[in-house]
Image (tube, rainbow, N blue to C red):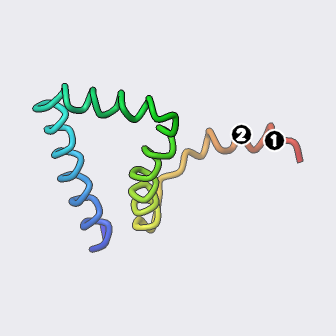
Amino acid sequence: MAGLEILIARFFSVSLFLIGLSHLIQPRFWRDYFIKIKETGAAGIIIARYTLPQGLLIVLGFRKMPRACPVEAHALRYTPA
């Protein structure tokens, strides 16, 4: 792994561990938070505001992403041209 890939992997390992720990320690707070988000009617936009940048950082930070060749080949074979 290159230096940037290691940095991204460590960052997300720590951050996801802390988020999971927070969910375990304060489940009532997170339940109420997600209920409030759901009531706004814009839950998808609110959640995407946090997850999209993280996903882009992961995808753009890794030089060689693993590819699901059999699935892609199957999907491309039956895609109308």
* Helix, strand or loop at mark 2: helix
Q: Residue at x 46, y 60 (%)?
A: 56
Q: Are circles 1 and 2 on residues that touch, CB within 8 Å?
A: yes
Query: Which residue appears farthest toward the bottom when viewing the image?
Result: 3
Q: Residue at x 44, y 52 (%)?
A: 49
Q: Is residue 42 above or below residue 66?
A: above
User: Residue 32 versus residue 80: which sits nearer the camera?
Assistant: 32
Q: Residue at x 21, y 52 (%)?
A: 15
Look at mark 2 in the image and give the residue it sits on. 75
Disc 1 residue type? Answer: Thr
Q: Quadrant of residue 21?
A: top left
Look at mark 1 in the image and give the residue it sits on. 79
Image x and y of residue 68, in percent? 55, 45
Within 10 angstroms of label 2, few (less than 14), some, or many (20 or more) residues?
few
Within 10 angstroms of label 1, few (less than 14), some, or many (20 or more) residues?
few
Judge left or right: residue 72 versus residue 37: right
Image x and y of residue 51, in percent? 41, 50
* Helix, strand or loop at mark 1: loop
Q: Quadrant of residue 5?
A: bottom left
- Disc 1/disc 2 C-alpha distance (Å): 6 Å
